[in-house]
Image: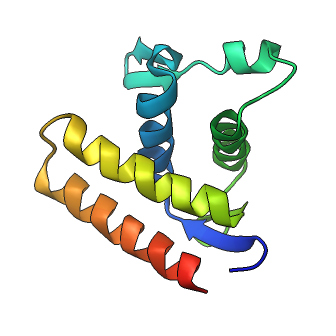
Amino acid sequence: MAGSVEFAFNSDEMILALMSLIRTTNLSMLRPSPDGFSVDFEALDKKTALTADERLMMKFRVALESPPTEASHALHLDPAEVQRLGETLEKLESLQPWPADVLAMSGALRARLAAAAQG
């Protein structure tokens, strides 16, 4: 994969991928809410220089705030972002026990990311 690739995520995959980034980079962004949790992007909004992981989180934010096309959200990811998402999903799987359906979704998403990385 030489340049960026458009990668489609369904809504559940978007949340899972964003959670994997947050859990491995800045857990304090998660806030309790009536629906379970919310993501507080305020700290990132105030920064003048974002890390690669923070820029990737902001891509997810923009995508989640936009209406999906055909039940999916498309993100343009560069090779490093594809690799990083695979790593953070794998780490998320090991942080705590997860229901089988979450592990299956994470594994399937990681497989798709690996295929995208192969070109």
Number of labels in the image equals: 0
Q: Which residue is drawn at 32% across and 59% down?
A: 106
Q: Which colouring convention does the figure follow? A: rainbow
Specify the quadrant of the image occupied by residue 109. Answer: bottom left
Tell me the quarter of the image containing the C terminus: bottom right
57 horizontally vs 89: left or right? right
Does residue 68 appear in the picture of this structure?
no
Q: Residue at x 52, y 18 (%)?
A: 29
Q: Residue at x 32, y 52 (%)?
A: 90
13 horizontally vs 105: left or right? right
Q: Which residue is drawn at 67% across and 44% down?
A: 56
Above or below for 83 versus 60: below
Q: Which is more toward the observer, 56 or 38?
A: 56
Q: Position of residue 64 (x, y in %)?
A: 63, 45
Q: Specify the farthest residue to the right.
A: 48
Above or below for 24 versus 34: below
Does residue 32 appear in the picture of this structure?
yes
Q: Position of residue 40 (x, y in %)?
A: 59, 18
Above or below for 83 versus 30: below
Above or below for 119 versus 44: below
45 horizontally vs 73: left or right? right
Tell me the quarter of the image containing the N terminus: bottom right
Q: Where is residue 60 in the image (x, y as percent from the top left)?
A: 64, 45
80 horizontally vs 89: left or right? right
Q: Specify the farthest residue to the bottom.
A: 119
